[in-house]
Image (cartoon, rainbow, N blue to C red):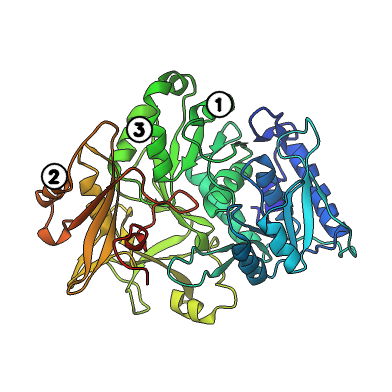
Amino acid sequence: MGTTLKQLLADHPEATPAIGAPGRPWLSYGALRALSDEIRAQLRQQGVGAQDRVAIVLPNGPEMATAFITIAQAATTAPLNPSYREDEYAFYLEDLKAKALVVEAGYDGPALKAAQGLGLQVLRVAVAEGAAAGAFDLVGEGAEPAAAGEPAADDVALILHTSGTTSRPKIVPLLQSNVAASARNIAESLSLTSEDRCLNVMPLFHIHGLVAAVSASLQAGASIFCTAGFNAMNFFAMMNEARPTWYTAVPTMHQAILTRAGRNAEVIKDVPLRFLRSSSASLPAQVMEQLQETFGAPVIEAYGMTEAAHQMCCNPLGQQKPGAVGVAAGPLVRIAHESDNHLIDGTGEVVISGDNVTPGYESNPDANAKNFFEVDGRRWFRTGDQGALDEDGFLHLTGRLKEIINRGGEKVSPLEVDGVLMDHPAIQQVVTFALPHPKLGEEVAAAVVLREGQEVTEREIRDFAAARMADFKVPRKVVIMDEIPKGATGKMQRIGLAEKLGLVEPA
């Protein structure tokens, strides 16, 4: 059983395709293993050792996938969002204590300026003309060579920051063994084999794409077709070229794909999927059912987060429960009291324990004391999500604890309101959020996107909700929009949405 990323690749046949991309030859597993050895040697020649941290700023595509998987076999990787500004890069690079930055050969953007300001070594990805997808060399300006050696199971493979929507982002170190365990858990829960092919549209600076699409596929000896990122306009063209057996995405991406599915029925018929996967946010039951009807394949909803190296729960193949995020799929999943450190029955905070869970936030004893606790010799991590397990062991989330709306003492689950509003025939997307109120503390509000050609008023939406739920849950404010603001990974953001929409003054 592999406990490092190198071991994930070790046993797959030489000629089996591993990494693909539009218009490029496939990179085989044999070539990927050879590339891993070459990149390790090049890093050592550039003075980067097994314990050093390497930030990666590359666009989505095959080189980003192979840069992560090869550098993580030689050092600690820290993928960063290519859309950051210079001051953001300066913060993250310094916070990470990065030794080197990896960028494209001709890159001259804000990450380079931030790295130069901090005195970091800059390594450039050089791709030869006609090279297989993901094949590259690392070119630097030279340095004192570092000692040979490879990371062990308890060394850090990947560092990511939490989203930091309400506070300073926390550093999440994930060990080689954490990433390997999560890749194995996902591959097993999806029954991945070497016959499978993932169409990756997820950003590869985020745990979802890095582990669910790339690492889990490599664990299974399967292949990954790496696109330049999600684009609803060319999704079906990519699907037609890649010939995948599955793809994984966030709910907003699935919804965008559905809007173009009708005119791409021939591709859907010609490229039958074994399943579709959704994660990183709750998938409305209505969308799950529409996806299954459109693609004629099961939709596997999973529940993950950075601190768990992604997956915690997954709906078993052939046993999906719309509205549930699945059963425990790797770590143990329990419910804990929201303030006291003990496990309970019923509704409370979701907690997890397992080999895929980070050992703790870096240099943040307060966050570790708040988010980790021990019961009967087992260490549990508080996810910050509220939910309950049903009689079949399926987890049903009611929302982030920070996102639960407190309307004058009445607690409202935004996910519940989302589910009711999604039943309205004119509504395509919805996100329910808290609107500050001078007397009640918080009021229920919702932002909605209408289906093409549909018209409905705020009053009609509120009346629809009032006929289906208790009065205190009915949104007092409904904002009809062309598009709901989303984060870097395509998720709709509830926290701070009232400010973004100009409904309250910025704090």
Marks 3 & 2, CB-CB < 8 Å contact: no
Q: What's the CA distance linking mark 1 and mark 3? A: 18 Å
**Image position, residue 476 (x, y; %):** 17, 58
Q: Sequence-wise, which precedes: disc 1 or disc 3?
A: 1
Marks 1 & 3, CB-CB < 8 Å contact: no
Q: Could you tell me the amino acid type at mark 3?
A: Gln
- Say which of 315 and 74 sits in front: 74
Q: Residues within 10 Å of mark 2 (few under 14, many from 20)?
A: few
Q: Could you tell me the amino acid type at mark 1?
A: Arg
**Image position, residue 222 (x, y; %):** 61, 37
**Image position, residue 488 (x, y; %):** 50, 52
| SS class, disc 2 | helix
What number is the disc on residue 243?
1
Q: In the rendered view, does 184 fall on the left or right side of 482?
A: right
| SS class, disc 3 | helix
**Image position, residue 91 (x, y; %):** 61, 69
Q: Residue 475 sits in which quadrant?
A: bottom left
Q: Could you tell me the amino acid type at mark 2?
A: Glu
Q: Sequence-wise, which precedes: disc 3 or disc 2?
A: 3
Q: Which residue is mark 3?
A: 292
**Viewport quadrant of the C terminus:** bottom left
Q: In the rendered view, does 408 fall on the left or right side of 351?
A: left
Q: Which residue is mark 2?
A: 460
Position of residue 294 relative to residue 153, above or below, is: above
